């Protein structure tokens, strides 16, 4: 968490809290999988609901090796804890992925709330021009 609202909370999920991420981007969900880049971005807790954790997120997936080295694609979307598979919008890219559009179907494969760690499996479909 990099910022929190200066309000009395009615949500157990910290409505208005802002989080920053800088995570490894790998070929597969295993912790030992080959590193191909990093995922950096922001997300904000965007629901005042007491039961459902909802975020709006922006994440840039940057390749640091392989065919797309130096390129990236960007996700900007809403995500809810009610969804088993999160459908996220791909809204652009740079380098070889300039003007990319598409979607990312993400599911959570591991969570450790104590350590604030999670492993997400992202299945990306990109259309670039």
Image (tube, rainbow, N blue to C red):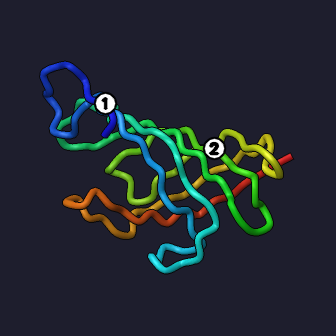
Label 1, on which residue?
Answer: 3
The residue most toward the top is 7
Position above or below: 80 against 64: above
Badge 2 element: strand
Work out which quarter of the rendered image holds the N terminus and state it.
top left
Q: Earlier in the sequence, mark 1 or mark 2?
A: 1
Position above or below: 99 against 62: above
Q: Quadrant of residue 12?
A: top left
Task: Write the residue at 59% across / 46% down.
Answer: 60
Residue 55 placement (x, y as % from top left): 38, 39
Badge 1 element: loop
Q: Residues within 10 Å of mark 1 (few under 14, many from 20)?
A: few
Number of marks drawn = 2
Separation of residues labelled 1 and 2 (CA atoms): 22 Å
Task: Write the residue at 43% across / 36% down.
Answer: 56
Residue 99 placement (x, y as % from top left): 79, 40
Residue 7 placement (x, y as % from top left): 18, 19
Q: Which mark is residue 74?
A: 2
Task: Write the residue at 83% across / 52% down.
Answer: 96
Residue 83 placement (x, y as % from top left): 38, 53
């Amino acid at each position: 968490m990099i910022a929190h609202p200066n309000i009395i909370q009615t949500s157990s999920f910290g409505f208005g809290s802002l989080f920053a991420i800088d995570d490894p981007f790998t070929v597969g969900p295993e912790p030992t999988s080959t590193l191909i880049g990093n995922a950096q971005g922001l997300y904000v807790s965007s629901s005042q609901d007491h039961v459902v954790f909802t975020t709006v997120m922006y994440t840039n997936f940057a390749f640091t090796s392989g065919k797309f080295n130096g390129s990236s694609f960007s996700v900007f979307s809403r995500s809810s804890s009610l969804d088993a598979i999160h459908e996220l919008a791909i809204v652009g890219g740079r380098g070889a992925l300039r003007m990319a559009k598409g979607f990312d179907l993400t599911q959570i494969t591991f969570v450790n709330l104590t350590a604030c760690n999670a492993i997400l499996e992202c299945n990306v479909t990109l259309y670039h021009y």
